[in-house]
Image: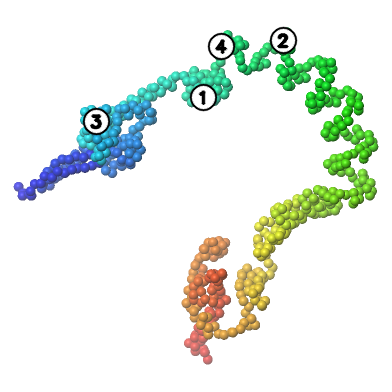
Amino acid sequence: MPLCPQIVITPITVTSTGMTTTSIIPIVAATTEEVDELQTEIDTIEIAVNGKNKIYRQPTAPDGSVYPLTEGDIWFDTDDGNKQYYWTGTAWVSVQDNAIATAQATADSKIKTFYQTSPPTATGVGDIWFDTDDGNKQYFWNGTAWVSVQDLGIAAAEAGAAAAVAASAAATAAATAAQTTADGKNKIYRQATAPTGTLAVGDLWFNTAEDNKPNRWNGTAWEAYGFGNLAIGNLDAQKITTGFLAAGRIQAASLDATVLVAGSITAAQISAGTITATQIAAGTITASQIAASTITGSLIAAGTITASNIAATTITAEKIATGTITATQIAAGTITASQIQARSISGDRLEFLAITANEIDVETITAAEIAANSITVDRLTAGTLTAFTLRTSSGARRVTVSASTNSISFTESSTTVGHIGPASVDGIVMHYGSTFNPNVTTYPNAYVSSGDARIAYNSTTYVQTSSAGVVISGNLFSISNFYNQDTTTTTNAANTWMSSTNGLTRRSTASSQRYKQDIVDIRTIQDLDPKKLLDLPVRAFRYKSDYLDSADDRSGSLIPGFIAEEVATAYSVAADQVDGVIESWNDRYIVPGLLALIQDLHTRIEILEGNNA
Protein backbone atom coordinates (compact mmCIF):
# COMPACT_ATOMS: atom_id res chain seq x y z
CA MET A 1 0.00 0.00 0.00
CA PRO A 2 1.52 3.33 -1.02
CA LEU A 3 2.27 5.99 1.45
CA CYS A 4 -0.18 8.91 1.53
CA PRO A 5 -0.21 12.32 3.22
CA GLN A 6 -2.22 13.34 6.24
CA ILE A 7 -5.96 12.93 5.56
CA VAL A 8 -7.79 16.23 5.76
CA ILE A 9 -11.57 16.37 5.93
CA THR A 10 -12.82 19.69 4.57
CA PRO A 11 -16.49 20.74 4.34
CA ILE A 12 -17.28 21.95 0.82
CA THR A 13 -20.21 24.23 0.06
CA VAL A 14 -21.62 23.79 -3.42
CA THR A 15 -23.63 26.88 -4.44
CA SER A 16 -25.78 27.30 -7.56
CA THR A 17 -28.62 29.57 -8.58
CA GLY A 18 -31.82 28.36 -6.95
CA MET A 19 -30.16 25.67 -4.70
CA THR A 20 -27.67 25.53 -1.83
CA THR A 21 -26.41 22.20 -0.57
CA THR A 22 -23.78 21.70 2.11
CA SER A 23 -22.17 18.35 2.64
CA ILE A 24 -18.97 16.99 4.09
CA ILE A 25 -16.85 15.23 1.52
CA PRO A 26 -13.55 13.69 2.60
CA ILE A 27 -10.78 14.91 0.42
CA VAL A 28 -7.89 12.44 0.50
CA ALA A 29 -5.02 11.61 -1.63
CA ALA A 30 -7.06 9.07 -3.58
CA THR A 31 -5.99 6.90 -6.46
CA THR A 32 -6.90 7.77 -10.03
CA GLU A 33 -9.55 5.07 -10.06
CA GLU A 34 -11.10 6.44 -6.87
CA VAL A 35 -11.11 9.95 -8.28
CA ASP A 36 -12.81 8.69 -11.45
CA GLU A 37 -15.44 6.87 -9.42
CA LEU A 38 -16.04 10.00 -7.35
CA GLN A 39 -16.35 12.10 -10.53
CA THR A 40 -18.86 9.60 -11.94
CA GLU A 41 -20.98 9.91 -8.80
CA ILE A 42 -20.77 13.71 -8.96
CA ASP A 43 -21.87 13.65 -12.62
CA THR A 44 -24.78 11.38 -11.71
CA ILE A 45 -25.86 13.75 -8.92
CA GLU A 46 -25.49 16.75 -11.23
CA ILE A 47 -27.65 15.06 -13.89
CA ALA A 48 -30.26 14.25 -11.26
CA VAL A 49 -30.20 17.79 -9.92
CA ASN A 50 -30.32 19.29 -13.41
CA GLY A 51 -33.29 17.12 -14.23
CA LYS A 52 -35.35 18.83 -11.55
CA ASN A 53 -37.47 21.80 -12.45
CA LYS A 54 -36.15 25.13 -11.25
CA ILE A 55 -37.81 28.41 -10.30
CA TYR A 56 -36.18 31.68 -11.39
CA ARG A 57 -36.83 35.19 -10.08
CA GLN A 58 -35.09 37.79 -12.27
CA PRO A 59 -35.88 40.71 -14.64
CA THR A 60 -34.69 38.93 -17.82
CA ALA A 61 -35.69 35.57 -19.28
CA PRO A 62 -33.30 32.73 -18.24
CA ASP A 63 -31.32 31.56 -21.27
CA GLY A 64 -29.82 28.28 -19.92
CA SER A 65 -26.34 29.76 -19.61
CA VAL A 66 -26.17 28.86 -15.86
CA TYR A 67 -28.32 25.71 -15.80
CA PRO A 68 -29.84 23.87 -18.73
CA LEU A 69 -33.51 24.77 -19.12
CA THR A 70 -35.93 21.90 -18.42
CA GLU A 71 -39.51 21.70 -19.61
CA GLY A 72 -41.72 22.94 -16.77
CA ASP A 73 -39.19 25.40 -15.30
CA ILE A 74 -40.88 28.48 -13.75
CA TRP A 75 -39.75 32.10 -14.20
CA PHE A 76 -41.16 35.10 -12.29
CA ASP A 77 -40.44 38.33 -14.25
CA THR A 78 -39.53 40.84 -11.50
CA ASP A 79 -39.66 43.69 -14.02
CA ASP A 80 -43.31 42.94 -14.88
CA GLY A 81 -45.08 42.58 -11.50
CA ASN A 82 -43.70 39.03 -11.05
CA LYS A 83 -45.61 37.85 -14.12
CA GLN A 84 -45.20 34.05 -14.30
CA TYR A 85 -43.90 32.00 -17.26
CA TYR A 86 -43.07 28.32 -17.80
CA TRP A 87 -40.55 26.70 -20.18
CA THR A 88 -42.26 24.61 -22.88
CA GLY A 89 -38.98 23.11 -24.02
CA THR A 90 -38.51 25.75 -26.74
CA ALA A 91 -39.84 29.03 -25.34
CA TRP A 92 -41.08 30.85 -22.23
CA VAL A 93 -44.90 30.98 -22.23
CA SER A 94 -47.10 33.05 -19.91
CA VAL A 95 -48.88 30.94 -17.28
CA GLN A 96 -51.77 33.40 -17.27
CA ASP A 97 -54.85 32.53 -19.34
CA ASN A 98 -57.13 35.23 -20.75
CA ALA A 99 -56.71 37.08 -17.42
CA ILE A 100 -60.36 36.88 -16.49
CA ALA A 101 -60.65 38.85 -13.31
CA THR A 102 -62.71 36.20 -11.52
CA ALA A 103 -60.24 33.43 -12.34
CA GLN A 104 -57.34 35.59 -11.20
CA ALA A 105 -59.10 36.39 -7.93
CA THR A 106 -59.75 32.67 -7.36
CA ALA A 107 -56.11 31.81 -8.07
CA ASP A 108 -54.94 34.56 -5.74
CA SER A 109 -57.11 33.11 -2.96
CA LYS A 110 -55.41 29.72 -3.36
CA ILE A 111 -51.76 30.73 -3.23
CA LYS A 112 -50.26 33.89 -1.80
CA THR A 113 -46.76 35.25 -2.17
CA PHE A 114 -45.01 37.15 0.61
CA TYR A 115 -41.93 39.41 0.45
CA GLN A 116 -40.73 40.16 3.98
CA THR A 117 -37.94 39.60 6.47
CA SER A 118 -39.82 37.32 8.92
CA PRO A 119 -41.99 34.23 8.34
CA PRO A 120 -45.57 35.28 7.51
CA THR A 121 -48.70 33.75 8.94
CA ALA A 122 -49.70 31.32 6.19
CA THR A 123 -53.31 30.61 5.32
CA GLY A 124 -53.01 27.85 2.72
CA VAL A 125 -50.78 25.05 1.58
CA GLY A 126 -48.46 26.19 -1.20
CA ASP A 127 -48.10 29.82 -0.05
CA ILE A 128 -44.72 31.27 -1.13
CA TRP A 129 -42.44 33.40 1.06
CA PHE A 130 -39.30 35.18 -0.18
CA ASP A 131 -37.01 36.00 2.76
CA THR A 132 -35.74 39.50 1.85
CA ASP A 133 -33.14 39.29 4.64
CA ASP A 134 -31.60 36.20 3.06
CA GLY A 135 -31.19 37.13 -0.60
CA ASN A 136 -34.88 36.40 -1.30
CA LYS A 137 -34.46 32.77 -0.35
CA GLN A 138 -37.71 30.98 -1.20
CA TYR A 139 -39.96 28.92 1.11
CA PHE A 140 -43.37 27.28 0.76
CA TRP A 141 -45.95 26.45 3.44
CA ASN A 142 -46.61 22.69 3.71
CA GLY A 143 -49.49 23.09 6.11
CA THR A 144 -47.45 23.04 9.31
CA ALA A 145 -44.14 24.78 8.59
CA TRP A 146 -42.21 26.89 6.08
CA VAL A 147 -39.96 24.60 4.01
CA SER A 148 -37.15 25.80 1.73
CA VAL A 149 -37.88 25.10 -1.92
CA GLN A 150 -34.20 25.31 -2.75
CA ASP A 151 -33.25 21.93 -1.30
CA LEU A 152 -34.32 18.48 -2.38
CA GLY A 153 -37.88 19.29 -1.23
CA ILE A 154 -38.52 21.36 -4.36
CA ALA A 155 -40.99 18.71 -5.50
CA ALA A 156 -43.43 19.94 -2.87
CA ALA A 157 -43.25 23.43 -4.33
CA GLU A 158 -43.88 21.99 -7.77
CA ALA A 159 -46.92 20.18 -6.43
CA GLY A 160 -48.16 23.44 -4.93
CA ALA A 161 -47.61 25.22 -8.24
CA ALA A 162 -49.46 22.47 -10.06
CA ALA A 163 -52.32 22.84 -7.61
CA ALA A 164 -52.35 26.58 -8.27
CA VAL A 165 -52.48 26.00 -12.02
CA ALA A 166 -55.31 23.52 -11.55
CA ALA A 167 -57.17 25.96 -9.30
CA SER A 168 -56.70 28.72 -11.86
CA ALA A 169 -58.03 26.46 -14.61
CA ALA A 170 -61.03 25.55 -12.46
CA ALA A 171 -61.70 29.21 -11.74
CA THR A 172 -61.42 29.99 -15.46
CA ALA A 173 -63.92 27.24 -16.27
CA ALA A 174 -66.29 28.57 -13.61
CA ALA A 175 -65.97 32.09 -14.96
CA THR A 176 -66.56 30.88 -18.52
CA ALA A 177 -69.66 28.95 -17.39
CA ALA A 178 -70.96 32.03 -15.55
CA GLN A 179 -70.31 34.18 -18.59
CA THR A 180 -72.09 31.67 -20.83
CA THR A 181 -75.08 31.67 -18.47
CA ALA A 182 -75.10 35.47 -18.44
CA ASP A 183 -74.83 35.57 -22.23
CA GLY A 184 -77.87 33.35 -22.49
CA LYS A 185 -80.09 35.89 -20.71
CA ASN A 186 -82.02 38.46 -22.70
CA LYS A 187 -80.75 42.01 -22.42
CA ILE A 188 -82.54 45.35 -22.53
CA TYR A 189 -80.90 48.29 -24.30
CA ARG A 190 -81.76 51.99 -24.01
CA GLN A 191 -79.83 54.00 -26.63
CA ALA A 192 -80.21 56.12 -29.78
CA THR A 193 -78.59 53.66 -32.21
CA ALA A 194 -79.33 49.99 -32.89
CA PRO A 195 -77.24 47.68 -30.65
CA THR A 196 -74.73 45.42 -32.38
CA GLY A 197 -72.47 42.58 -31.36
CA THR A 198 -73.66 39.32 -29.77
CA LEU A 199 -77.45 39.51 -29.63
CA ALA A 200 -79.99 36.93 -28.47
CA VAL A 201 -83.50 36.35 -29.77
CA GLY A 202 -85.85 38.31 -27.55
CA ASP A 203 -83.43 41.13 -26.67
CA LEU A 204 -85.35 44.40 -26.25
CA TRP A 205 -84.16 47.84 -27.45
CA PHE A 206 -85.85 51.13 -26.55
CA ASN A 207 -84.82 53.66 -29.23
CA THR A 208 -84.26 56.88 -27.27
CA ALA A 209 -83.95 58.77 -30.59
CA GLU A 210 -87.61 57.86 -31.38
CA ASP A 211 -89.31 58.58 -28.06
CA ASN A 212 -88.30 55.17 -26.60
CA LYS A 213 -89.92 53.20 -29.41
CA PRO A 214 -89.58 49.47 -28.48
CA ASN A 215 -87.84 47.02 -30.84
CA ARG A 216 -87.22 43.25 -30.50
CA TRP A 217 -84.33 41.18 -31.93
CA ASN A 218 -85.82 38.33 -34.01
CA GLY A 219 -82.50 36.61 -34.57
CA THR A 220 -81.54 38.49 -37.75
CA ALA A 221 -82.86 42.05 -37.38
CA TRP A 222 -84.54 44.53 -35.03
CA GLU A 223 -88.33 44.65 -35.56
CA ALA A 224 -90.89 47.07 -34.15
CA TYR A 225 -92.40 45.76 -30.92
CA GLY A 226 -95.61 47.70 -30.43
CA PHE A 227 -98.15 47.52 -27.63
CA GLY A 228 -101.65 46.10 -28.22
CA ASN A 229 -104.84 47.97 -27.49
CA LEU A 230 -105.24 46.11 -24.17
CA ALA A 231 -101.81 47.22 -22.99
CA ILE A 232 -103.28 50.61 -22.05
CA GLY A 233 -106.70 50.27 -20.45
CA ASN A 234 -109.45 52.89 -20.14
CA LEU A 235 -107.61 55.70 -21.88
CA ASP A 236 -109.89 58.74 -21.78
CA ALA A 237 -109.40 62.34 -22.89
CA GLN A 238 -108.61 63.51 -19.34
CA LYS A 239 -105.49 61.36 -19.38
CA ILE A 240 -104.12 63.32 -22.36
CA THR A 241 -102.63 66.44 -20.78
CA THR A 242 -100.02 67.50 -23.35
CA GLY A 243 -99.69 67.48 -27.10
CA PHE A 244 -102.40 67.50 -29.74
CA LEU A 245 -104.31 65.11 -31.94
CA ALA A 246 -103.00 65.50 -35.44
CA ALA A 247 -105.41 65.94 -38.31
CA GLY A 248 -104.62 62.39 -39.40
CA ARG A 249 -106.21 61.09 -36.17
CA ILE A 250 -109.54 62.91 -36.83
CA GLN A 251 -111.96 61.23 -39.21
CA ALA A 252 -112.78 63.30 -42.28
CA ALA A 253 -115.99 65.36 -41.89
CA SER A 254 -116.37 64.17 -38.26
CA LEU A 255 -116.22 67.81 -37.13
CA ASP A 256 -118.96 69.94 -38.66
CA ALA A 257 -120.94 73.01 -37.66
CA THR A 258 -123.38 70.92 -35.58
CA VAL A 259 -120.51 69.68 -33.39
CA LEU A 260 -118.86 73.08 -32.95
CA VAL A 261 -120.39 75.48 -30.45
CA ALA A 262 -121.19 78.85 -31.94
CA GLY A 263 -118.29 81.25 -31.46
CA SER A 264 -115.92 78.48 -30.38
CA ILE A 265 -113.59 79.17 -33.33
CA THR A 266 -112.48 82.78 -33.50
CA ALA A 267 -109.72 84.47 -35.35
CA ALA A 268 -107.38 83.76 -32.41
CA GLN A 269 -107.89 79.98 -32.97
CA ILE A 270 -107.01 80.20 -36.67
CA SER A 271 -103.28 80.17 -37.38
CA ALA A 272 -101.99 82.58 -39.95
CA GLY A 273 -102.15 81.01 -43.40
CA THR A 274 -104.49 78.21 -42.24
CA ILE A 275 -107.34 79.26 -44.49
CA THR A 276 -106.18 79.61 -48.09
CA ALA A 277 -108.03 80.19 -51.30
CA THR A 278 -108.50 76.42 -51.74
CA GLN A 279 -110.59 76.32 -48.51
CA ILE A 280 -112.88 79.17 -49.63
CA ALA A 281 -115.63 78.27 -52.10
CA ALA A 282 -116.09 80.61 -55.03
CA GLY A 283 -118.47 83.43 -54.12
CA THR A 284 -118.35 82.72 -50.40
CA ILE A 285 -116.89 86.10 -49.54
CA THR A 286 -118.68 89.00 -51.12
CA ALA A 287 -118.38 92.72 -50.69
CA SER A 288 -120.99 92.65 -47.90
CA GLN A 289 -118.72 90.35 -45.85
CA ILE A 290 -115.77 92.77 -46.10
CA ALA A 291 -115.93 95.73 -43.74
CA ALA A 292 -114.79 99.06 -45.05
CA SER A 293 -110.99 99.45 -44.91
CA THR A 294 -110.65 95.77 -43.86
CA ILE A 295 -108.32 94.96 -46.74
CA THR A 296 -105.40 97.35 -47.01
CA GLY A 297 -102.26 97.28 -49.05
CA SER A 298 -100.32 95.58 -46.26
CA LEU A 299 -102.76 92.61 -46.37
CA ILE A 300 -102.35 92.03 -50.09
CA ALA A 301 -99.37 89.82 -50.90
CA ALA A 302 -97.12 90.99 -53.69
CA GLY A 303 -98.44 89.70 -57.00
CA THR A 304 -101.84 88.70 -55.55
CA ILE A 305 -103.78 91.12 -57.72
CA THR A 306 -102.80 90.77 -61.34
CA ALA A 307 -104.26 92.26 -64.50
CA SER A 308 -106.64 89.30 -64.79
CA ASN A 309 -108.20 90.25 -61.40
CA ILE A 310 -108.87 93.87 -62.39
CA ALA A 311 -111.84 94.57 -64.68
CA ALA A 312 -111.19 96.87 -67.57
CA THR A 313 -111.49 100.59 -66.66
CA THR A 314 -111.98 99.60 -62.97
CA ILE A 315 -109.06 101.76 -61.86
CA THR A 316 -109.26 105.27 -63.17
CA ALA A 317 -107.18 108.32 -62.48
CA GLU A 318 -109.51 109.59 -59.74
CA LYS A 319 -109.01 106.24 -57.92
CA ILE A 320 -105.25 106.85 -57.68
CA ALA A 321 -104.14 109.24 -54.97
CA THR A 322 -101.46 111.71 -55.80
CA GLY A 323 -98.02 110.14 -55.30
CA THR A 324 -99.47 106.64 -54.89
CA ILE A 325 -97.61 105.17 -57.86
CA THR A 326 -93.88 105.88 -57.65
CA ALA A 327 -90.95 104.44 -59.49
CA THR A 328 -90.67 101.60 -56.93
CA GLN A 329 -94.24 100.46 -57.83
CA ILE A 330 -93.44 100.22 -61.54
CA ALA A 331 -91.71 96.98 -62.49
CA ALA A 332 -88.85 97.20 -64.96
CA GLY A 333 -90.19 97.09 -68.51
CA THR A 334 -93.80 97.67 -67.39
CA ILE A 335 -94.14 100.99 -69.22
CA THR A 336 -92.91 100.78 -72.78
CA ALA A 337 -92.98 103.24 -75.64
CA SER A 338 -96.41 101.98 -76.71
CA GLN A 339 -97.84 103.12 -73.33
CA ILE A 340 -96.41 106.65 -73.63
CA GLN A 341 -98.29 109.14 -75.76
CA ALA A 342 -96.13 111.04 -78.17
CA ARG A 343 -94.66 114.21 -76.63
CA SER A 344 -96.49 113.46 -73.34
CA ILE A 345 -93.23 113.55 -71.37
CA SER A 346 -91.50 116.90 -71.64
CA GLY A 347 -88.55 118.36 -69.87
CA ASP A 348 -90.67 119.96 -67.12
CA ARG A 349 -91.98 116.47 -66.19
CA LEU A 350 -88.51 114.96 -65.74
CA GLU A 351 -86.81 115.35 -62.38
CA PHE A 352 -83.25 116.61 -62.45
CA LEU A 353 -80.85 113.67 -63.10
CA ALA A 354 -83.84 111.30 -63.41
CA ILE A 355 -82.34 109.85 -66.59
CA THR A 356 -78.71 108.81 -66.16
CA ALA A 357 -76.45 106.51 -68.11
CA ASN A 358 -77.95 103.53 -66.25
CA GLU A 359 -81.37 104.28 -67.81
CA ILE A 360 -80.00 104.43 -71.36
CA ASP A 361 -79.37 101.10 -73.12
CA VAL A 362 -76.19 100.59 -75.09
CA GLU A 363 -76.42 102.23 -78.55
CA THR A 364 -79.84 103.69 -77.68
CA ILE A 365 -78.64 107.19 -78.42
CA THR A 366 -76.72 107.30 -81.66
CA ALA A 367 -75.54 110.17 -83.79
CA ALA A 368 -78.90 110.21 -85.57
CA GLU A 369 -80.67 111.08 -82.28
CA ILE A 370 -78.28 113.95 -81.50
CA ALA A 371 -78.85 117.20 -83.33
CA ALA A 372 -75.84 118.85 -84.83
CA ASN A 373 -73.97 121.11 -82.40
CA SER A 374 -76.28 120.04 -79.53
CA ILE A 375 -73.41 118.65 -77.42
CA THR A 376 -70.65 121.19 -76.92
CA VAL A 377 -67.74 121.33 -74.52
CA ASP A 378 -69.62 123.62 -72.15
CA ARG A 379 -72.32 120.93 -71.83
CA LEU A 380 -69.84 118.26 -70.68
CA THR A 381 -69.22 118.17 -66.94
CA ALA A 382 -65.66 117.54 -65.84
CA GLY A 383 -65.14 113.81 -65.54
CA THR A 384 -68.22 113.06 -67.65
CA LEU A 385 -66.38 110.72 -69.99
CA THR A 386 -65.12 108.07 -67.54
CA ALA A 387 -65.09 104.27 -67.56
CA PHE A 388 -65.46 104.28 -71.37
CA THR A 389 -63.31 102.94 -74.18
CA LEU A 390 -62.01 105.45 -76.70
CA ARG A 391 -60.92 104.20 -80.09
CA THR A 392 -59.16 105.90 -82.94
CA SER A 393 -61.50 104.01 -85.26
CA SER A 394 -63.91 101.09 -85.29
CA GLY A 395 -62.07 99.33 -88.10
CA ALA A 396 -59.58 96.49 -88.26
CA ARG A 397 -56.70 98.78 -87.36
CA ARG A 398 -57.03 100.93 -84.28
CA VAL A 399 -55.60 102.16 -80.98
CA THR A 400 -57.86 101.74 -77.96
CA VAL A 401 -57.62 103.60 -74.65
CA SER A 402 -59.40 101.62 -71.93
CA ALA A 403 -60.41 103.41 -68.73
CA SER A 404 -61.22 100.09 -66.98
CA THR A 405 -57.62 98.87 -67.27
CA ASN A 406 -55.98 102.29 -67.75
CA SER A 407 -54.12 100.82 -70.71
CA ILE A 408 -53.56 101.38 -74.42
CA SER A 409 -54.01 98.45 -76.79
CA PHE A 410 -53.00 98.11 -80.44
CA THR A 411 -55.06 96.25 -83.03
CA GLU A 412 -53.84 95.14 -86.44
CA SER A 413 -56.07 93.24 -88.91
CA SER A 414 -58.76 92.94 -86.21
CA THR A 415 -56.28 91.19 -83.84
CA THR A 416 -55.11 92.85 -80.62
CA VAL A 417 -51.36 92.36 -80.66
CA GLY A 418 -50.10 94.27 -77.62
CA HIS A 419 -50.67 96.63 -74.70
CA ILE A 420 -49.02 99.42 -72.73
CA GLY A 421 -50.20 100.18 -69.21
CA PRO A 422 -49.29 100.58 -65.53
CA ALA A 423 -47.84 97.49 -63.85
CA SER A 424 -49.52 96.41 -60.64
CA VAL A 425 -46.13 95.73 -59.05
CA ASP A 426 -44.69 99.18 -59.91
CA GLY A 427 -43.91 101.02 -63.13
CA ILE A 428 -45.00 100.56 -66.71
CA VAL A 429 -45.30 97.30 -68.70
CA MET A 430 -45.53 96.73 -72.45
CA HIS A 431 -46.28 93.18 -73.57
CA TYR A 432 -47.48 91.11 -76.49
CA GLY A 433 -50.90 89.40 -76.29
CA SER A 434 -54.64 89.85 -76.66
CA THR A 435 -55.45 90.82 -73.04
CA PHE A 436 -53.70 93.41 -70.90
CA ASN A 437 -51.86 91.88 -67.90
CA PRO A 438 -50.56 94.36 -65.29
CA ASN A 439 -48.79 91.56 -63.33
CA VAL A 440 -45.79 91.49 -65.73
CA THR A 441 -46.27 87.75 -66.34
CA THR A 442 -47.30 87.83 -70.01
CA TYR A 443 -44.30 87.44 -72.34
CA PRO A 444 -42.51 88.80 -74.29
CA ASN A 445 -42.56 92.10 -72.39
CA ALA A 446 -40.66 95.25 -71.54
CA TYR A 447 -40.91 96.53 -67.98
CA VAL A 448 -39.68 99.79 -66.46
CA SER A 449 -39.97 100.48 -62.73
CA SER A 450 -38.42 102.85 -60.24
CA GLY A 451 -35.68 100.33 -59.51
CA ASP A 452 -34.84 98.62 -62.81
CA ALA A 453 -35.62 98.10 -66.47
CA ARG A 454 -36.07 94.73 -68.14
CA ILE A 455 -36.66 93.23 -71.56
CA ALA A 456 -37.79 89.61 -71.22
CA TYR A 457 -38.66 86.81 -73.63
CA ASN A 458 -39.86 84.62 -70.74
CA SER A 459 -39.27 84.33 -66.98
CA THR A 460 -35.76 82.87 -67.47
CA THR A 461 -34.50 84.68 -70.59
CA TYR A 462 -34.09 88.43 -70.09
CA VAL A 463 -31.76 91.44 -69.87
CA GLN A 464 -32.11 93.54 -66.74
CA THR A 465 -30.42 96.79 -65.77
CA SER A 466 -30.46 98.33 -62.30
CA SER A 467 -28.23 100.19 -59.88
CA ALA A 468 -26.46 96.88 -59.25
CA GLY A 469 -25.43 96.58 -62.90
CA VAL A 470 -26.51 94.53 -65.91
CA VAL A 471 -27.90 91.02 -65.54
CA ILE A 472 -28.29 88.71 -68.53
CA SER A 473 -30.22 85.47 -68.03
CA GLY A 474 -30.15 82.79 -70.74
CA ASN A 475 -27.74 82.01 -73.55
CA LEU A 476 -25.64 84.92 -74.82
CA PHE A 477 -24.67 84.89 -78.49
CA SER A 478 -22.07 87.13 -80.18
CA ILE A 479 -20.85 87.37 -83.77
CA SER A 480 -17.47 88.85 -82.78
CA ASN A 481 -15.03 88.99 -79.90
CA PHE A 482 -16.10 90.36 -76.55
CA TYR A 483 -13.83 92.86 -74.76
CA ASN A 484 -13.98 94.27 -71.25
CA GLN A 485 -11.97 97.46 -70.71
CA ASP A 486 -10.11 98.07 -67.45
CA THR A 487 -11.54 101.36 -66.20
CA THR A 488 -8.68 101.82 -63.74
CA THR A 489 -6.12 102.53 -66.50
CA THR A 490 -5.65 105.47 -68.85
CA THR A 491 -4.98 103.20 -71.83
CA ASN A 492 -7.37 101.41 -74.16
CA ALA A 493 -5.78 98.03 -73.67
CA ALA A 494 -8.27 95.21 -73.22
CA ASN A 495 -7.59 93.18 -70.09
CA THR A 496 -10.33 90.58 -70.62
CA TRP A 497 -10.91 88.85 -73.93
CA MET A 498 -13.47 86.20 -74.89
CA SER A 499 -12.99 84.49 -78.23
CA SER A 500 -16.08 84.06 -80.42
CA THR A 501 -14.46 81.17 -82.30
CA ASN A 502 -13.53 78.78 -79.49
CA GLY A 503 -15.16 80.33 -76.40
CA LEU A 504 -11.83 80.66 -74.53
CA THR A 505 -11.48 83.57 -72.13
CA ARG A 506 -8.19 85.20 -71.29
CA ARG A 507 -7.16 87.97 -68.91
CA SER A 508 -4.24 89.94 -70.24
CA THR A 509 -2.37 93.20 -70.17
CA ALA A 510 -1.11 95.11 -73.15
CA SER A 511 2.27 93.91 -74.46
CA SER A 512 3.40 96.96 -76.39
CA GLN A 513 6.58 98.68 -75.20
CA ARG A 514 4.74 101.98 -75.17
CA TYR A 515 2.82 100.85 -72.11
CA LYS A 516 5.95 99.75 -70.13
CA GLN A 517 8.99 101.14 -68.28
CA ASP A 518 11.95 99.87 -66.17
CA ILE A 519 12.52 97.04 -68.67
CA VAL A 520 15.31 94.65 -67.41
CA ASP A 521 16.37 91.01 -67.82
CA ILE A 522 14.26 88.70 -65.67
CA ARG A 523 17.40 86.96 -64.34
CA THR A 524 18.57 90.18 -62.66
CA ILE A 525 15.55 90.35 -60.34
CA GLN A 526 15.89 88.05 -57.37
CA ASP A 527 12.14 87.56 -56.82
CA LEU A 528 11.66 86.77 -60.54
CA ASP A 529 14.63 84.40 -60.90
CA PRO A 530 13.22 81.70 -63.23
CA LYS A 531 15.23 79.01 -61.40
CA LYS A 532 12.60 79.23 -58.67
CA LEU A 533 10.20 77.58 -61.09
CA LEU A 534 12.30 74.43 -60.81
CA ASP A 535 11.02 74.10 -57.22
CA LEU A 536 7.40 74.23 -58.37
CA PRO A 537 5.75 70.77 -58.06
CA VAL A 538 3.90 69.55 -61.14
CA ARG A 539 0.75 67.81 -59.97
CA ALA A 540 -2.03 65.56 -61.25
CA PHE A 541 -5.53 65.83 -59.81
CA ARG A 542 -9.29 65.54 -60.38
CA TYR A 543 -11.65 68.49 -60.09
CA LYS A 544 -14.49 68.13 -57.60
CA SER A 545 -17.91 67.30 -59.05
CA ASP A 546 -19.41 70.59 -57.88
CA TYR A 547 -16.69 72.58 -59.70
CA LEU A 548 -16.28 70.93 -63.11
CA ASP A 549 -19.50 70.30 -65.05
CA SER A 550 -20.23 66.61 -65.60
CA ALA A 551 -20.60 67.32 -69.33
CA ASP A 552 -16.93 68.33 -69.53
CA ASP A 553 -14.77 65.67 -71.23
CA ARG A 554 -12.23 65.89 -68.40
CA SER A 555 -14.80 65.46 -65.58
CA GLY A 556 -13.61 62.73 -63.19
CA SER A 557 -10.25 62.31 -64.98
CA LEU A 558 -6.75 62.95 -63.65
CA ILE A 559 -5.30 66.03 -65.31
CA PRO A 560 -1.90 67.75 -64.98
CA GLY A 561 -1.49 71.18 -63.50
CA PHE A 562 -0.27 73.36 -60.66
CA ILE A 563 -1.69 74.10 -57.20
CA ALA A 564 -2.14 77.87 -56.85
CA GLU A 565 -0.96 77.88 -53.23
CA GLU A 566 2.26 76.04 -54.24
CA VAL A 567 2.77 78.54 -57.10
CA ALA A 568 2.49 81.35 -54.52
CA THR A 569 5.27 79.72 -52.49
CA ALA A 570 7.66 78.95 -55.36
CA TYR A 571 6.97 81.89 -57.73
CA SER A 572 4.64 84.33 -55.99
CA VAL A 573 4.25 86.75 -58.92
CA ALA A 574 2.34 84.06 -60.87
CA ALA A 575 -0.30 83.49 -58.16
CA ASP A 576 -3.59 85.37 -58.63
CA GLN A 577 -5.68 86.40 -55.66
CA VAL A 578 -9.35 87.30 -55.31
CA ASP A 579 -10.27 89.39 -52.27
CA GLY A 580 -6.97 88.46 -50.64
CA VAL A 581 -7.44 84.69 -51.15
CA ILE A 582 -5.21 82.72 -53.55
CA GLU A 583 -7.45 81.57 -56.42
CA SER A 584 -5.39 80.54 -59.49
CA TRP A 585 -2.04 80.72 -61.26
CA ASN A 586 -1.33 83.00 -64.22
CA ASP A 587 0.41 81.42 -67.20
CA ARG A 588 1.42 84.85 -68.55
CA TYR A 589 3.94 85.13 -65.69
CA ILE A 590 5.08 81.51 -65.69
CA VAL A 591 5.74 81.27 -69.46
CA PRO A 592 8.43 84.01 -69.50
CA GLY A 593 10.30 82.27 -66.68
CA LEU A 594 10.04 78.91 -68.44
CA LEU A 595 11.37 80.47 -71.66
CA ALA A 596 14.31 81.96 -69.73
CA LEU A 597 15.15 78.49 -68.37
CA ILE A 598 14.88 77.00 -71.86
CA GLN A 599 17.19 79.68 -73.19
CA ASP A 600 19.75 78.92 -70.48
CA LEU A 601 19.56 75.19 -71.27
CA HIS A 602 19.89 75.88 -74.96
CA THR A 603 23.01 77.96 -74.37
CA ARG A 604 24.57 75.19 -72.26
CA ILE A 605 23.75 72.57 -74.90
CA GLU A 606 25.30 74.71 -77.57
CA ILE A 607 28.48 75.02 -75.49
CA LEU A 608 28.63 71.30 -74.78
CA GLU A 609 28.11 70.44 -78.41
CA GLY A 610 30.72 72.99 -79.51
CA ASN A 611 28.26 75.03 -81.47
CA ASN A 612 28.90 78.32 -79.67
CA ALA A 613 31.28 79.68 -82.21
Image check: 356 left or right of 462?
right
Spot occupied by residue 125 in the image (x, y as percentages of width and height): 25, 28
Badge 1 local density, few (<14 within 10 Å), some, or many (20+)?
A: some
Q: Nearer the viewer, mark 1 or mark 3?
A: 3
Spot occupied by residue 310 in the image (x, y as percentages of width and height): 86, 24
Q: In the image shown, does 452 or 496 lie closer to the viewer?
A: 452
Look at the numbered discs 2 and 4 and tell me whether their residues touch, using CB distance below 8 Å: no
Of the numbered discs in the image, which one, if any, rests on residue 141?
Answer: 3
Badge 2 local density, few (<14 within 10 Å), some, or many (20+)?
A: few
Local secondary structure at mark 1:
loop
Say which quarter of the image contains residue 33: top left
Instruction: Report, in whole angstroms, how far the alpha carbon at label 1 lies from the one at label 4.
Output: 28 Å
Q: Earlier in the sequence, mark 2 or mark 1?
A: 1
Q: List the residue tagged with mark 1.
A: 195
Look at the numbered discs 3 and 2 and tell me whether their residues touch, using CB distance below 8 Å: no
Spot occupied by residue 334 in the image (x, y as percentages of width and height): 86, 32
Of the numbered discs in the image, which one, if any, rests on residue 261?
Answer: 2
